[in-house]
Image (cartoon, grey):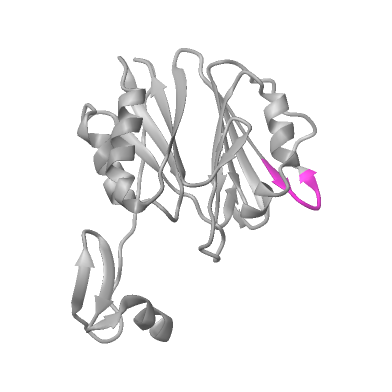
Amino acid sequence: MQVKTFHYKKNTGWSINQFPALDSKDTLVLAFCAPEYFDNPEPLIELRAAYPQSCIAGCSTAGEIYNDTIYDNSISVAVTKFEKSKVNIVTVDIHNAAQSFEAGEKLAQSLKKDNLKSIIVLSDGLSVNGSALVEGLKMNLNPSVIITGGLAGDGSNFKKTWILHQDKFFHNSITAIGLYGNDIEIGYGSKGGWDIFGTERLITHSEGNVLYEIDGQPALTIYKKYL
């Protein structure tokens, strides 16, 4: 397996003089992009031209990481050429969060084949319930299949996110990447959750993992006042 990472900034262009020669049908290209590149796709067009055989996926972000630095208004790219493992990408549409579990089931069924080791999920960040999506993915998969990924962002706007699949942009969609083979090993880690501060309050209306009301007031009103 060969892995190369590089970066694009609007004022200086690509961080490399030429794209690594890793194009193949078993190459995965991941591109994490500032939201503005939906309307200014030239760098992504260049990326697609450099890797015509490869599986390309990506999404809009709320900040891009390259090496040990967090950037805005940029594109971070990782290109992985597998020697023994296979790659497959599928995308499904989703119109509201209530369809999240069903969308996860569809993605899992499309990717479910012998030697499936891992699924990387890149999802619309505004029309999807991430918890329900993961439960749908897990429903018909072997527990040994590792699911990683996340929800797309659009900075601090919370208006529109997008997914990249090959050379096309999608709103209200979820892309999932399947990695296959007996020779690949996947590792992952995560950390998250809330910490306590301020006055203790009572949740008075919620559905599943969606919080609507605190102490009889809309949750958003409380957040805006105190956060």
Please say whether residue 12 is one of the residues in the magenta stretch. yes
Please give left or right for residue 101 compared with residue 76 in the image: left
Q: Which residue appears at 46% of the width and 48% of the height?
A: 124
**Residue 12, horizontal then vertical, whole percent:** 81, 49
Please give left or right for residue 20 compared with residue 192 in the image: right
**Residue 181, horizontal then vertical, whole percent:** 37, 16
**Residue 83, horizontal then vertical, whole percent:** 51, 14
Q: Which residue appears at 77% of the width and 29% of the height?
A: 18
Evaluate whether residue 197 shows in this view. yes
Point out the image quarter for the C terminus: bottom left
Span highlighted in magenta in the image: 7-13
Nearest to the observer: residue 2 or residue 34 = 34
The relative height of residue 175 versus residue 154 in the rendered view (above or below) is above
Please say whether residue 137 is one of the residues in the magenta stretch. no
Q: Which residue appears at 54% of the width and 47% of the height?
A: 162
Please give left or right for residue 70 compared with residue 139 in the image: right
Number of numbered discs: 0
Please give left or right for residue 227 compared with residue 47 in the image: left
Evaluate whether residue 68 shows in this view. no
The relative height of residue 93 versus residue 116 in the rendered view (above or below) is below
Which image quadrant for residue 204?
Answer: bottom left
**Residue 43, horizontal then vertical, whole percent:** 73, 40
